Amino acid sequence: MEILSIPEMQRADLLTIANGSSGFALMLAAGRAVASAANDLVEEGPILVVVGAGNNGGDGLIAATELMAMGREVSVIMLGDREALKGDAALAAREWKGPVFPFHPQAIRQPALIIDALFGAGLNRPVKGDALAVIEAINASGAPVLSIDLPSGINGTTGMVMGVAVRAVETVTFFRRKPGHLLLPGRLHCGRVRVADIGIDDAVLDEIKPLTFENCVALWQSAFPVPRIDGHKYGRGHAVVLSGGLAATGAARLAARGALRGGAGLVTVASPRDALAVNAAALTAIMIRAIDTAVEFETLLSDRRFNACVIGPGLGVGYRTRELVQAALAAPCRSVLDADALTSFADAPDRLFEAIRAAGAELVLTPHEGEFPRLFSDMSNKNPLRSKLERVRVAAERSGAVVLLKGPDTVVAAPDGRAAIACNAPPWLATAGAGDVLSGMIAALLAQHVPTFEAACIGAWMHGEAGGEAGPGLIAEDLPEVLPAVFRRLYDEFGIDY
């Protein structure tokens, strides 16, 4: 589940070499893993290996050598001069006994498979010149592509396309995934990702201490709240969701339904008096309390049984919402701030951040890409060298809250530097109200005493799984109703009877 940055992966290599291996031994293992993957992808026909001047090219030359030894028809084209290769890549070039053909687009033609060994994960400059032309020719060829480490042209740190990038059907990487495998658009270029064992011991992670993870079950299983046979609803917490006025009540009800299906023992919608009848007509198991002012809300939350709340969906932007947020921060409950609760602080985000730190509040902020820059205006998603991962990490540190930046590659980050990237969200989750349900699901986990970072990670993962369970055509109302199926799959994985 660990995701390694480019410097962390380089350190894993160096630690392995320091423990008695050699760089060339790692390259041999990598090249053999690529050759095996290539053999699996196409059983016959010519294979073209496109080689760069660095260690990625060395991996490709080893793969070419191994495939030729298997009896496969292999040809190689190389960027730069073979004699200019250095270090382990030069050793790999000596292993390759076949010819190296000129590096130009016409050399691509239509092989059965192209192995992309042009650039590695460390690419941090735009692709230009001959390399750009060759990558465009690779993509235009129609041949399946197997990329080594990352598709050439993808920045391994940010997942961004550096001008142009190979579109692979499969990518072989080594030891652990890199951020560019999970962040968009890099993930779309990778195809299937195969993580190969090349002889790096997991013990190196004890020294590296990575703080980035794939958002998967192994990350948070120990924190997942499983109801006990001797438990009761009060032990599973009581979540409160603030409702908007008469014409804007639906978002709060979606969040409340998400909280109830997400496992909170009790859920209350705190409704303005003018919307009580509308909310009462639509709710059954979810309770209702009349709340018009921040003072009334603060009084409600002074009862410690109300231990989690959602503020923002459909609430309206302005002074009243800011006052309601301040009331929640002063209370002994844990909160999810979404939508209008975030936008209401757009003109004074530091006021929110200072209040969070002063109260020592446990908060999850759940913006989407439109809301994020309203609080963090200096962190544009247009900068190709600033990753989504970095932006969310900085936002969490600055705000003092766990930040969940929604999207097809949702990133969750904590103020202590931990971060998780999700890759299980289907495209049909992009529908009105889906984020409101997510807020409620996270509140349910907070109500059940799950730590804040883990609550946000679990909520994001289950939200993605629910989207997959509901399938194409889903609307937000479907998401809470398919959560029982998601719970059953988890319990089966945990070995829990139900």
Image (cartoon, rainbow, N blue to C red):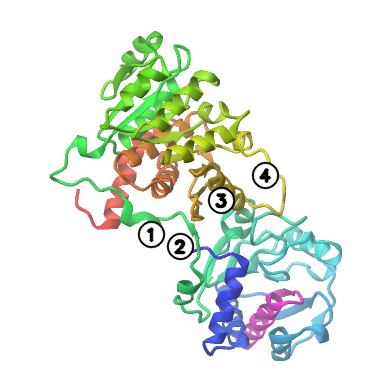
| 3D distance between C-alphas at marks 2 and 3 | 18 Å
Residue that numbered label 4 is attached to: 381
Instruction: Examine the image and state in which quarter residue 166 appears.
Output: bottom right
Q: Quadrant of the N terminus?
A: bottom left
Residue 43 visible somewhere in the drawing = no
Circle 3 sits in a helix, a strand or a loop, which is it?
Answer: helix
Instruction: Give the residues drawn in magenta, as a range.
Output: 46-73
Residue that numbered label 3 is attached to: 393
Q: Position of residue 234 (x, y in %)?
A: 20, 35
Whether the residues at callouts 4 and 3 have beta carbons within 8 Å, the answer is no
Q: Residue at x 55, y 65 (%)?
A: 4
Q: Residue at x 45, y 75 (%)?
A: 202
For marks 3 and 1 on the same chain, the one whose residue lies earlier in the sequence: 1
- Is residue 405 rendered to the left or right of residue 359? right
Whether the residues at callouts 2 and 1 have beta carbons within 8 Å, the answer is yes
Amino acid carrying label 4: it is Asn
24 in the magenta segment: no
Residue that numbered label 1 is attached to: 218
Q: Position of residue 393 (x, y in %)?
A: 56, 51
Q: Position of residue 102 (x, y in %)?
A: 85, 77
**Which label sits on residue 1?**
2
